[in-house]
Image (tube, rainbow, N blue to C red):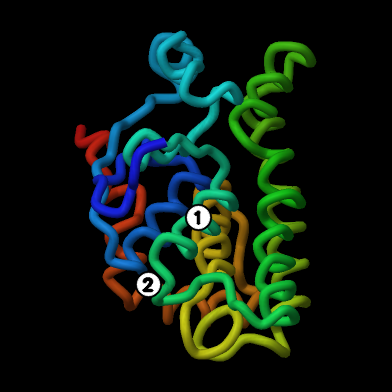
């Protein structure tokens, strides 16, 4: 492996992918320049299934980060890596208890809510179980709401301006895309005052604004 200290970063991303959105936020918070290489998850049956991309990411998912000749998938692993190569601002705290709390907040989304309503699951519901679009949307909305309920209860006594205090952490990188999915699937946030407050504070920062789906080069313009 060659030195990555001065190597540029490339992020294989899809504008609507919440996992890609998390990493874009993290890169922006750290001020790390990066190039977006779009991977359309629907066109041609999904560009993530192309052989060239499968060699980069055997999971056939986004995001994938390229740093020099180092290749890394999975948003949690990528954000942890970014903390290692550029220590400040820290997104996953060093303190053992604060680190554990931050990872728990991330995992409420990462392993609890998002995997059961992602594109691959929704496509499986349609193909194997003949789910209609309305049924697919209702399934996604159920799990997104479940994630919001869990986050609200977990963060209510821990949040400051942001999810875990008065500075953005990896937790915010996961919360904001989850709330974007809530908007997409028409899940009301009325019952989640902590999450609404966190979102207002996050979206006041350019790092979050510039990571949004509508700011991405592959966002449909027509």
Disc 1 or 2, which lies upstream in sequence?
1
**Seen from this angle, which residue lies furthest front?**
2
Relative height, residue 177 to residue 30 (above, below)? above
Tell me how far mark 1 sits from mark 2, CA to CA.
Answer: 24 Å
The image shows residue 116 at horizontal and vertical percentages of 73, 39
Q: In this view, does 160 lie to the left or right of 53?
A: right
Mark 2 neighbour density, 10 Å: few (under 14) some (14–19) many (20 or more)? some
The residue where tag 1 is placed is 81
The residue where tag 2 is placed is 203
Q: In this view, does 160 lie to the left or right of 218?
A: right
Q: Which residue is pictured at 45% across the width and 24% down the height?
A: 41
Q: In this view, does 49 lie to the left or right of 36?
A: right
Relative height, residue 48 to residue 205 (above, below)? above
Mark 1 neighbour density, 10 Å: few (under 14) some (14–19) many (20 or more)? some
Is residue 193 something that shows in the picture? Answer: no
**As rendered, which of 169 and 214 lies closer to the eye?**
169
The image shows residue 171 at horizontal and vertical percentages of 58, 69
**As rendered, which of 86 and 187 lies closer to the eye?**
86
Figure quadrant of residue 124: top right
Q: Which residue is pictured at 50% across the width and 17% down the height?
A: 54
Q: Which residue is pictured at 27% across the width and 70% down the height?
A: 206
């Amino acid at each position: 492996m060659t030195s990555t200290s001065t190597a540029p970063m490339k992020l294989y991303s899809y504008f609507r992918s919440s996992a890609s959105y998390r990493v874009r936020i993290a890169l922006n918070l750290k001020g790390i320049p990066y190039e977006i290489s779009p991977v359309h998850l629907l066109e041609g049956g999904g560009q993530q299934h192309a052989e060239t991309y499968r060699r980069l990411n055997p999971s056939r998912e986004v995001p994938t980060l390229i740093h020099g000749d180092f290749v890394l998938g999975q948003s949690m692993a990528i954000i942890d890596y970014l903390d290692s190569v550029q220590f400040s601002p820290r997104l996953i705290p060093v303190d053992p208890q604060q680190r554990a709390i931050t990872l728990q907040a991330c995992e409420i989304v990462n392993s609890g809510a998002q995997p059961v309503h992602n594109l691959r699951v929704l496509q499986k519901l349609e193909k194997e179980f003949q789910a209609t679009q309305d049924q697919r949307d209702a399934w996604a909305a159920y799990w997104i709401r479940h994630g919001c309920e869990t986050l609200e209860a977990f963060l209510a006594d821990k949040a400051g301006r942001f999810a875990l205090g008065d500075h953005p952490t990896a937790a915010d990188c996961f919360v904001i895309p989850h709330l974007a999915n809530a908007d997409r699937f028409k899940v009301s946030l009325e019952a989640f005052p902590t999450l609404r407050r966190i979102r207002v504070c996050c979206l006041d920062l350019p790092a979050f604004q510039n990571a949004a789906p509508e700011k991405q080069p592959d966002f449909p313009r027509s």
